[in-house]
Image (spheres, grey):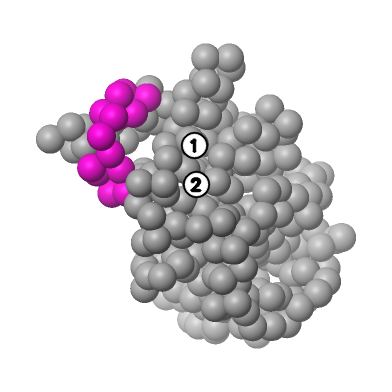
Amino acid sequence: MNKILLIAIFFSYILQSYAQELNCRVTVNYEGLQIRNRELLSDFALIIENYMNSTQFNNEPWEGEKINCSLSIFFTGASSDIDYTAQVVIVSTRPVYKSDRQSLMLTINDANWNFKYERGQALYSNQAVYDPITSFLDFYANIIIGWDWDTWSEFGGNTNYQKAFNIANLGINSNFRKGWERTSDAYNRTRFCEDLLNEKFRPFREAFYEYHYGIDYYQVDKTQAQKHIVNLIQVLSEMRTKMDINSVLIRTFFDAKYGEIADLLRDYPDKSIVDKLKRIDPSHISKYNELLR
């Protein structure tokens, strides 16, 4: 089946128009806080969820299903009645053509959210001005939307990635720099954006688009679909011979996709692909070894 035709069929299948882009579920864990702070944050989960689901992050209606995502917020401390620190796990998924399966897109563990919050505080989106709550939420909304768009068209997420990068720059120059400043941590917001917009990762993003065409095509022609999935591994293997690909971007990709890759290539005949996977993603060697059994 022609690629353009398959994509057109898929879009006709899901095509709806929404003002907002996200269908976000928010859960909050207060166990790291004193009782008083827990009481002051009693409305926090609802406030954040309403913001994520009622804000329009792009300037035009969203065509297609809303993106399913979630924020799991774990409060880690409070230095006053309004000053908080939290760890957040960000997850998003994408529907797969001719399947009831959702493909896991992102699973990011961000350990450095610092902000002020007063009970009943109203949240307003202004991506040109830094706010320790809404800028954090706007940043991840743009990452989620851009990451999703990159699967439907090559470099379709660029506009949202640039918005996220602009927010990161505001964060670096704010009084809430932690989490935004460039560090050597395994995950860093600003370095993630820089990787996404860096020309050296252009081959990966092209292959990322092809990969998701492959998972959509899997129910139509498994053999051809696997070739598109393997193409991404070949591209990363070639990139590895030329430069260091131990980047925030590549680690973030594999943290979400390693299980899916292993499942979709379980019966792939050329087992040499397993060695390439283990070299480019050593963190998940045990999963890839399952392909050799």
Does dot 1 land on a helix, a strand or a loop?
helix
Q: Which mark is residue 211?
A: 2
Can residue 4 be seen in the rendering of this structure? yes
Q: Does the magenta run of residues contain 195?
A: no
Seen in the picture, residue 17 relative to 184 is either above or below; the reply is: below
Give amino acid for label 1: Leu
Q: Does the magenta run of residues contain 275?
A: yes
Give amino acid for label 2: Tyr
Determine the residue positioned at 80% across, 58% down.
130
Asked if residue 158 lies left or right of residue 257, the reply is right
Q: Nearer the viewer, residue 29 or 3?
A: 3
Tag 2 near tag 1, CB within 8 Å:
yes
Q: CA distance from mark 2 to mark 1?
A: 6 Å
Q: Nearer the viewer, residue 218 or 33?
A: 218
Give the labeled residue for mark 1.
232
Seen in the picture, residue 204 relative to 53 is either above or below; the reply is: above
Q: Which residues are magenta?
A: 262-276
Give the quadrant of the C terminus: top left
Percent x, y of residue 172:
76, 43
